[in-house]
Image (cartoon, rainbow, N blue to C red):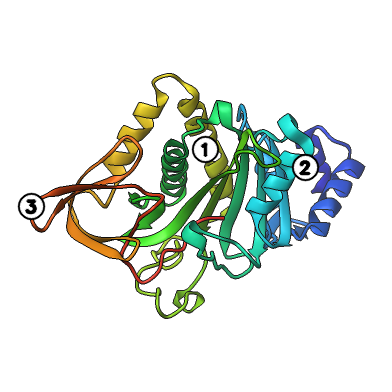
Amino acid sequence: MREQLASALGLSPAAVADALGALARHGFVIETHPMQGVRLSAVPPALLAAELAWDAARRRVGRIVRCEATVASTNDLAWEAARKTGQDSDGLAIFAEYQTAGRGRRGNRWLAPPHEAILCSVVLRAADAAADGAVLTRAAALAAAEAIEDQTGLEVGIKWPNDVVCDDRKVGGILVEARPGAPGAGFVVVGIGINCHQGPRAFPPDIRGHVTSLAMLGPTVDRTLLARSLLDRLDRRAAQTAREDGAGEVRQDAARRCRTLGRRITVLEGEDAYSGEVIDLDVDYGLILRLSDGGFRRFHAMTTRVAAPKDESGG
């Protein structure tokens, strides 16, 4: 049977044997049968850089892929790469199986057991990737939503400012960082987290009713295929932001997916709380609220948050 496989692939039997051995060393379980031939029966739990980069038609995002086991934060590794390799790091995507200090918006932590989520950070040149962090946040959220839909068929929305949601519960989050004036200036790092295989007990009790995973929503997702879709979608969205009219298109697409529009919410700004209906998103991705007293107020994403048990997003 290996001889037939070698003939089909145009390789020598020895080369096929070497390739199967290499796959086995990476954790792939391959069965051979004298009548049924060679069969892949199990794949390793970890993401592999070669699989994520294989046959990729991406122009930019994911042209270089790194996969790590345990890290403090994929965003920190991305910044280290930007400092050390400069322009060569543009498009670098770093994935980790587990983060000990993954961070999210407003200093919150991103928590996920090993092999249970997509934890990814991508380095982009700021000049080419839209220095406007609000636009890039929306672009990354759109890419994550589109990738999930590609692999699951679920309906996915965006909850202002950076949560990816299914069935009104958070399934992913975005954290875009820029460090003007610091080593690595001129770049942005896009952190993306997507909950994949977790069950309810993986989440702290105080947020359990407001978060979910793809497994909890029904479909079994292959993390490798999801990660590949994410890189493809982010590559397209990053290219879109670089076009003259691209930022406007991203804003429109994000508004169509926004699950916050038209809802009554409470926004926290410092020690003050404001309640009302979200009637629009401004150009800078702030909320425009019709307040309970009939007035209107604009709230910026960087200085406010929607009242909720917890806001954990990012990479």
Residue density around tag 1, few if under 14, some if 14–19, many if 20 or more, within 10 Å: many
Give the x, y percent position of residue 89.
71, 36
Viewer-side residue, 189 vs 255: 189
| Labels 3 and 2: the sequence-earlier one | 2
Is the residue under label 3 in contact with that under label 1 (CB below 8 Å)? no
> Residue shown at 33%/67% (left/top)?
308
Which residue type does callout 2 highlight? Answer: Leu
> Residue shown at 20%/48% (left/top)?
297
> Residue shown at 19%/61% (left/top)?
275
Viewer-side residue, 270 vs 277: 270
Asked if residue 238 is positioned above or below residue 163 in the image, the reply reads: above
Residue topped by disc 3: 294
Which residue type does callout 3 highlight? Answer: Gly
Residue density around tag 3, few if under 14, some if 14–19, many if 20 or more, within 10 Å: few
Tell me the distance, in whole angstroms, between the alpha carbons under discs 2 and 1.
36 Å
Residue topped by disc 2: 5
Which residue type does callout 1 highlight? Answer: Leu
Residue topped by disc 1: 234
Give the x, y percent position of residue 18.
89, 48
Q: Indicate the secondary structure of the residue bearing disc 2.
A: helix
